[in-house]
Amino acid sequence: MLERYSRQMLFAPIGEQGQRTLMSKSILIVGMGALGTVLANHMVRSGVGRVRMVDRDYVEPSNLQRQMLYDEEDAEQGLPKVIAAKHKLSRINSSVELEAVFSDVTAANIEGLLEGVDLVLDGTDNFQTRFLLNDACYRQGIPFVYGGAVSSRGMSAIFVPGVTPCLRCFISSADGGGQTCDTIGVISPIVDIVASYQAAEALKFLVGAAAQRRGSLLTLDIWQNQYFEMKMGKPKENCPCCGLKQYPALEQQADEMVSLCGRESVQISGHEPFELEAWKDRLSPAVKETKLNPYLLRAELNEGQRLVLFADGRVLVQGTDDLVRAKTLYARYIGG
């Protein structure tokens, strides 16, 4: 089994002992979009023993420009990203234990997702989820490798409870309409670069190379050729996470209806789990077209929007970011 890692073991800071250590470790990757697919690829090829992946979304054609594990067939089938990723990764390294969790990440399930995990890797696209990861990791003492990429810009850092400040010490609020890939775009090289910085810090942590970890928040713009590092310093005494031990994101209730920034989509939660076959039969006479797979049902509406029903009870209303319009369509076709 070690033969496949021979070139990695020739790298002296890892060596055979480091490789065996990697094979004993467990990580969680939250978000299997652009960053998450690169992270998972690196971690699985490097031989990390157990990789748990969680994501709430499914593969669409617009993902293929930068989300490296997916292909046109995945988009045509509308496969959940975690399922498509697991299929690909299991063929890359069958010795790695892969767990695919097709779910939203909330305060209600985050602690279960962290169970048995040595390190968390951030592949998300919003600060609400990042703060949730940050707070949960710091409460449980699990390091968190942050990454973000948009346009040609990226940021990355590793936050280690008890050693470094947390994300909240640098960014105080998740409120506001920040720029996202869905509003100003993104080029794929910045995704690969940021995720590779994250993966490098992950490997350092997992093999115990504490002295080599980067003690800064890295920002870069590969189009404008800019690179900057902000030294970590000490945790802020008034930080609700590091200083006050309050972990506010863990106390928040998940919104049952939320507009997904820049995506012309509204997610509505709170329905009981869907029997997808039965709902296909129920919706088919009233809509233009339905497409079903074992994980979700897509219904093209006569009004021009699309409903996506997930087995766990979530619904996406695609084609609008207006909450009132989304609620109207939801009530018309789903009820409630």
Image (spheres, helix red, strand yellow):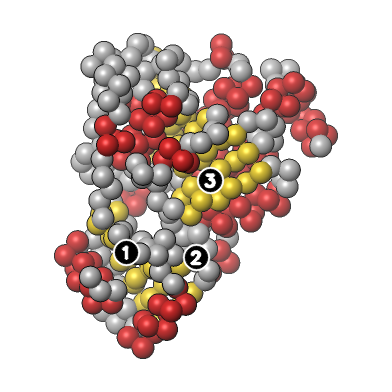
Q: Where 120 falls versus 201 (above or below)?
A: below
Residue 195 visible, this orientation? no
Mark with earlier residue (1, 2): 1
Mark drawn on residue 271: 1
Number of marks drawn = 3
Mark drawn on residue 295: 2
In the rendering, at what x and y percent does residue 241 appear?
31, 23
Q: CA distance from mark 3 to mark 1?
A: 24 Å
Residue depicted at 43% across the width and 56% down the height? 57
In the rendering, at what x and y percent does residue 94 appear?
73, 47
- Name the kind of residue labelled 1 in the image: His
In the rendering, at what x and y percent does residue 48 appear?
65, 35
Residue depicted at 37% across the width and 48% down the height? 181
Q: Are marks 3 and 1 in contact (CB under 8 Å)?
A: no
Label 1 SS: loop
**Other residues around mark 2 within 10 Å, as few (<14) / some (14–19) / many (≥20):** some
**Other residues around mark 1 within 10 Å, as few (<14) / some (14–19) / many (≥20):** some
In the rendering, at what x and y percent does residue 136 appear?
39, 32
Using the image as rendered, state which of residue 29 and residue 68 is in the foreground: 29
Residue under label 3, please give it. 53
